[in-house]
Amino acid sequence: MRTRVKICGITRPEDGRAAAMAGADAIGLVFYGPSPRCVTVAQAQAICAALPPFVTVTGLFVDAPAAQISSVLSQVPLDLLQFHGDESPEDCAGFGRPWMKALRMREGIDVAAEAARFHGARALLLDAYVPGVPGGTGERFDWSRIPAALPLPVVLAGGLSPDNVAEAVRQVQPWAVDVSGGVEAQDAQGARQPRIKSAAAMAALIEQVARHC
Ligand SMILES: O=C(O)c1ccccc1NCC(=O)[C@H](O)[C@H](O)COP(=O)(O)O
């Protein structure tokens, strides 16, 4: 099975296109105000317009009001919703669109029970738990905590980069990997630039996935 790749936190049309050209299966658009990667509807529309076909556009929300999600859905051609907060299964299913649920791997979480609870999801996205930061943390979690047999496809997230994604794919064999900070551009001091992706890093990550899945 080929492991799919989603590049999350795209904020610029050229980065969406570069992700697609590098072979990304999906991109993520963050509709969460406090995120440094948040996009407006107009920015999201421009990114979508720049994409070739067959790239899944995912809209990410964190405990957003239903009216906000509906408003975005009426203006942006999202293929998939990603719920990254404390949404209930009913909240997630309320839009008539395919969706996946992010689980932050806090101490003691029962992933199998959560999978049963969110059985209507297309996938479970497993991400690092960092108190106070819902996502895009750049942190890894202990992949051995993922139960071997889950009833839903697993999207592995959290601190992945071209340097560790091969190990992640070998160890976890997820349906997909989801990467944000690990493919961001860096400034002269090596600090990540959250609104800019590195085309070279995206290509390197996708090549690593292709070679090791
Ligand atoms: O990217 C964000 O800023 C973000 C903010 C709030 C909730 C979720 C967010 N990102 C979700 C993603 O799907 C990321 O790809 C995932 O958390 C992994 O991020 P990273 O560790 O930086 O690769």
Image (tube, rainbow, N blue to C red):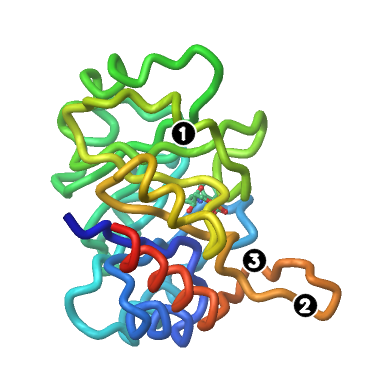
Earlier along the polypeptide chain: callout 2 or callout 1? 1
Residue 194's label in the rendered image is 3
- On screen, 21 above or below 28? below
Residue 143's label in the rendered image is 1
How far apart are labels 2 and 1 at the CA level? Answer: 30 Å
Where is residue 105 shown, x and y percent of the image? 49, 27
Which residue occupies 35% across, 21% down?
111
Where is residue 201 shown, x and y percent of the image? 54, 75
Q: Between residues 171 and 134, which one lies in front from this camera angle? A: 171
- On screen, 158 above or below 8? above
Instruction: Identify the amino acid type marked 3.
Output: Pro
Q: Are marks 1 and 3 in contact (CB under 8 Å)?
A: no
Where is residue 186 shown, x and y percent of the image? 71, 74
Residue 187's label in the rendered image is 2
Which residue occupies 38% across, 29% down?
87
Mark 3 surroundings: few (<14), some (14-19) or many (≥20) residues within 10 A: many
